[in-house]
Image (cartoon, rainbow, N blue to C red):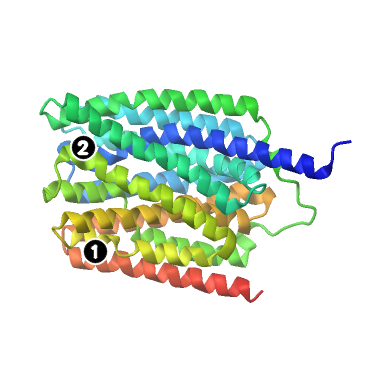
Amino acid sequence: MVKPEKTARALRRSALAFILLMGIVSLFSDMTHEGGKSILGAYLSLAGAPAAAIGFIAGLGELIGYSLRYATGRLADRTRQYWALTIAGYAVDLFAVPALALIPENGWMWAAALIVAERTGKAVKKPAKDTLLSFAATQNGVGRSFALQEFLDQLGAFAGPVMLFVVMYFKGSGDTFADYRRCFALLAVPAALTLGLLLAAKHFFPHPENFEPEEKKKAPRPAMNRDFRLYLAGTSLFALGFMDFSMITMHVSRVSLMNSRDLPLLYAGAMAVDAAAALFFGWLYDRRGMRSLVWSTLAAAPFAALIFLTQSRSALYLGAALWGIGMGAQESTLKAAVATLVPRQYRSSGYGMFQTVFGVCLFLGSWFTGWLYDRSLYVMVLFSAGVQILAALEFLRIGRMKSAG
C-alpha cells in the first residue's frame, strides 16, 4: 500500500515539474515578446510615431489585451477548455511580433495594428494559463511557484534583448530601422520553440486541474468578495502609475542618453532585476502575504524621477532597476494574491477581472503620462510616483484587515 505522504510528495514533484516546463515555455515566449519590446518604442519613433501616439498605442494595446480577459476568463471557467484557450492565444500573439519586421518605413499605423493583435492573443491565453499554473502552485506555495515561473520567464526577457543587441552589434548595417526589422524577423525562432514546448506540456500534463482538489463548500464569486475588491483598488492605482517600457526607450532615444544600439541591454538589465525581485518577493509573499506588496510598490515608485528628471546614466540604470522590481511584483506576487483570494471554481474569472481592471488603468496611465511627457516632465513624474504610493497604502490596509481577521 502506498503511504499518503509518498503520494503527496509525488504530487508535489509532478506539480513542480509542470511549473518548470511552463516556465521554459514562458522563457522562449518572453525572448520573443520582450526582445521586441526592448526596441519597440524607438522602432515606432523611427517609423514616424509622435510621443503621444507611442503612449496611446502602448496603452491601447494593453487596454485591449487586458479588457478582453474578463470575457475569456469567464469562458475558461464555463468551458474548462484551459489548454485550448492557452494554445490559441499563444499562436496569435507569437505570430504578431516577428510580423513587425514587415512594416514599411513610416508605417507605424501597421505596427500599431500588429501590437493590438499581439495583445489580443495574450488576452485569450492569460486567464486560462494563469489558472492552470494556479492549480499546480497550490502544491508548493503560490508565492514561490509563481515566483519560479516569473524567474524563468524573465530569463527569457533578459536573453531576448541581449540576443538583439549582439545581432545589431556584430551585424549592424548602420541603418537603424533596417537593423530593427532584421531583429524582429529573428524573433520567429524563439516563437516557434515556444509553441513546440507548449504542445509538449499539454501532452505530458493534460489535466493540471487535478493538482488542486475541488472545494466542498460554496464560495462567493469574485465580484462579491470584499477582500478581492479592495485588492483590485490597490492594483488599479499601481497600474495607473506604472508606465510601459516603450515610454522609457523613447525618452532615452530622444535625449541621446544611450546609443540606440544599446537600448536592448537597458531592458535586459531591467528584466534581470525583475527575475531576482520575483524570487525574493514570491518568497516574502508566502510569509508576509499582502504586506509584501507594500514594499515592492514603494521600491518601484521613484523609477520615473530617476529616468526622466536627470541626464545621468547612473540614475537611468537605477531607475530601470526599480522599474524591474515593479514588474517582478506585477508578474509574480500580484498573480499569487489572486490565487489566494479567489476560489478554485471562479479562478479564471478572478484572473480575468483582475487583468481587465489592471489593463484599463494601465491604458489610462500610459496615455496620460504620454500626454504629460510633451507638457511637463515634473508633473508626469509626480503623478507616476504619487499613485504608486497610494497603491502601497491600499495594500497595507488590506494586509492589516486580513491580519485582524
Q: Name the quadrant containing residue 259.
A: top left
Is residue 107 at all visible to an observer of this figure? yes
Q: Position of residue 354 (x, y in %)?
A: 52, 54
In the rendered view, tell whether residue 130 sits above or below residue 335. Answer: above
Relative to residue 90, is residue 78 depicted above or below? below
Judged from the image, the secondary structure of the residue bearing numbered disc 2 is helix
Image x and y of residue 238, in percent: 41, 62
Image position, residue 76 (x, y; %): 61, 40
The quadrant of the rendering that contains the N terminus is: top right
Which of pointers 2 and 1 lies earlier in the amino acid sequence? 2
Mark 2 burial class by Cα count in 10 Å: few <14, some 14-19, many 20+:
many
Distance (Cα) linking label 2 and label 1 = 24 Å
Amino acid type of the residue tagged 1 in the rendering? Ala
Q: Is residue 251 left or right of residue 91?
A: left
- Location of mark 2 (residue): 43
Do the residues under discs 2 and 1 have CB atoms within 8 angstroms?
no
